[in-house]
Amino acid sequence: MQVEERPPDETPWLRIDTPVWRGADPHAITPLLEELRHHARGAAVRHAPNSGDATLVTRAPLPHPIEEDRATTLAGTGAIQALLAAWAWSQARTRFGDRAFAWRDSLPHPTLGMDVTPSRVLHYRERVLHPQADARVGIFATTLLADTSEAVERNGVGLMPQRRPDGRRVAFAVDLNVTLGILEVGLVRGAVDANALGVALSLEGHGSEARAKACSHELLGRQLTPGADAWTLGSWTPLQRRDDLPGFGVSHAFFVPLALAEPDMGPEIAHATAGLVELVRTWLDEGAPARINAPRTNGGARARLVA
């Protein structure tokens, strides 16, 4: 866990890295990586294509004057990452036997020794995360969702909102200059993070799955560049087209566990969403070195929205 160095007049950023594998068999861990991304909500899985290295990463701002309180709250993400790493190690040991020991980082972990009692970390979900999240399922959660979606609409990022009848999700169209994206803001529940507010940006494409993985890696790398103003609370992943056409695009979701959320952070999450959209626009405008081949619309995205 570290605070990135930035000029004194800029907002500091907290970054939490948890190494999972070093030098693993790239083909053997592929299915485990997909499962890890599914469970690792609130953290990104950083993994270069065809690599045997994987790390869980969280990155978020520490605005004044709540810098210390925010850092203390987000420290809970470190415990979530430790739990996920322990799960990944146990899965590798179960599936691949003793040879999986060599893949683990030399840093302390439950089977090679920890700096703290393992139960304090690995029981965090049962002791803190789930009870506190369950207590916030009602008015707290619905208010946070409403504040966030309204702020997304106000800042002009989300267009043509579509609200689900159950009130748990709002979908927006997003103008990415050369194509359209879909932005969803909603309340979700997962095995590790319990109840959370999720924000997902999806960009359809007709590239190969390998190309979509390369794009995902590249976009995450941009988010994690020191000095970048991009929250990282989830991964970029390949996205299979929803229609009958072949091909993959990319999708990114970041999750704010309700147990770690603040009641008035809706506008801040909306601001983070705007930053995510701008990151994708810049990537596309620069020619997207790992091009996703997003379908272009006649007259451009704006013309389609107006129509």
Image (cartoon, rainbow, N blue to C red):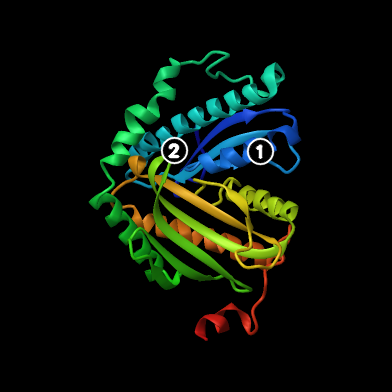
**In the image, what residue occupies the spot 56% across and 82% down?**
304
> Which residue has dot 1 on it?
31
Q: Amino acid at mark 2?
A: Ala
Q: Secondary structure at mark 1?
A: helix
Q: Nearer the viewer, residue 161 or 14?
A: 161
Q: Which residue is rendered at x = 41% and y = 71% of the image?
A: 161
Location of residue 25 (image quadrant): top right
Give x and y (percent) for residue 216. Answer: 65, 52
CA distance separating discs 2 and 1: 18 Å
Left or right: where does residue 286 sit relative to residue 264? Answer: right
Q: Nearer the viewer, residue 177 or 169?
A: 169
Q: Residues within 10 Å of mark 2 (few under 14, many from 20)?
A: few
Residue at 40 percent of width and 56 percent of height? 186
Q: Kindly state the secondary structure of the residue where label 2 is placed.
A: loop
Sequence-wise first label, 2 or 1: 1
Question: Quick check: marks 2 and 1 in contact, CB under 8 Å?
Answer: no
| Relative vertical location of residue 126 with respect to residue 221 in this rendering, above or below | above
* Left or right placement of residue 124 versus residue 232 in this view: left
140 displayed left or right of 288: left
Amino acid at circle 1:
Pro
Name the spot of residue 133 as percent of width and height, x first: 32, 40
- For this orientation, the residue located farthest to the front is 244
Q: Quadrant of residue 127?
A: top left
User: Residue at horizontal 43%, vertical 15%?
Assistant: 117
Q: Which residue is at the far left? A: 139
Rate crowding at label 1 as few (under 14), some (14 to 19) or many (20 or more) other CA atoms within 10 Å: few
Residue for badge 2: 191
